[in-house]
Amino acid sequence: MSIAEERLLAFAEEKLVTVPFDVYRYDPARGGQPRYQHYELRLAPHTPVLTGLLRIRDEIDPTLALRYSCRSAICGSCAMLVNSKSRLACKTPVGPEVKEHGRIVIDPMRNQPILRDLVVDQQPFWNRYEQMEPHLILDPKRPMPKDGPTRMSPTEVERFKETPRCISCAACYSACPAVEADPEFPGPMALAKLYRFVVDPRDGATQARLQKIQTNGLWLCLRCHLCTEACPKEVRPSERIRDLKELAVEAQGGTEPGSRHAIGFLKNIESAGTLNELKLVRQTSGLGGLVAALPQGVRMWRKKPEITKSPHPIEGIDEVKKIYEALDGKKKGKE
């Protein structure tokens, strides 16, 4: 018996379980209040959530609206919230969800207006993506060779990291609290795509890209890594955002509070192994920012007077300096 036949037999013998679905329902065109509608199906534990939703639509309630296409985790169309986490419904089996949560709660993706039920308007997501100019911008001083685009070495291609895997499903965008909190934040996918072109040796706009993003949302990332957790293709957007920050600082230094804060934090730890709060405020926001923060500083000083004192180097500061030296050596080796 082949492996495929063995798997089919195992699926056929798998016991069905009762799967409770609570599905978000809302049609703005008809008014009314959003609600959850309860359904129950008998399914094998390996059944994808998407299959369950399609059975609900086809066999129980044809009014349910959802978006899907390939059913193979390739197109990204079926991204939604499954028990409060951004996922692809076609890639999420019902069994583990029911075992952990007792039911399956389905919501539309966050950070995008709801059109109907589980279908959202992805225009904000795509607008921010387009703002990154996700295409090669050729340098007019380096015209394209007559025999076609410049070839890349395997090492150069490896710098893209996992970014070519992205299927633009918006799961990371849905999971991102920075998108929810600040309309200026481009979103994890847009920044991961930007990184892909910043490190492309054929691109002629690397400096312009880094300069633009430094003051246009890069440092608004909260470093929560929820985008990396949500990504179904292991693109690891939070790591690419970190790489972008390093590239921006290397190319341009501290150009605004976010990058100045990162540089000041780094220098504080290197010198004493701990933070000098007053010094960090001045390094981040300048003298004007320090003066503006004085009222808050006075309140903090009353509760903790030692905050105004320069911290003594921690025990083991020599080990901290060795870490910095090792990182500097690694950085020079890359160069």
Image (tube, helix red, strand yellow):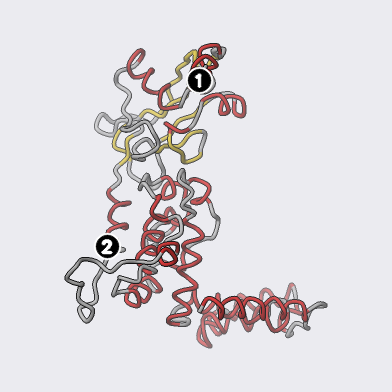
Q: How many marks?
A: 2
Q: Is residue 66 left or right of residue 285?
A: left
Q: Decide which of 22, 204 is in the foreground and name it.
A: 204
Q: Residue furthest left?
A: 146
Instruction: Give the x, y percent position of residue 122.
Output: 30, 46
Residue 318: horizontal and vertical position, in percent? 77, 81
At horizontal 41% and vertical 23% (from top left) the residue drawn is: 51
| Label 1 CA crowd tier, 10 Å (few <14, some 14–19, many 20+) | few
Q: Disc number at residue 135?
A: 2
Q: Secondary structure at mark 2?
A: loop
Q: CA distance from mark 2 to mark 1?
A: 45 Å
Q: Is residue 243 above or below residue 139?
A: above
Write the residue at 55% across / 56% down: 224
Q: Position of residue 24 (x, y in %)?
A: 41, 29
In-image side of 72 versus 318 (left or right): left
Q: Which mark is residue 2?
A: 1
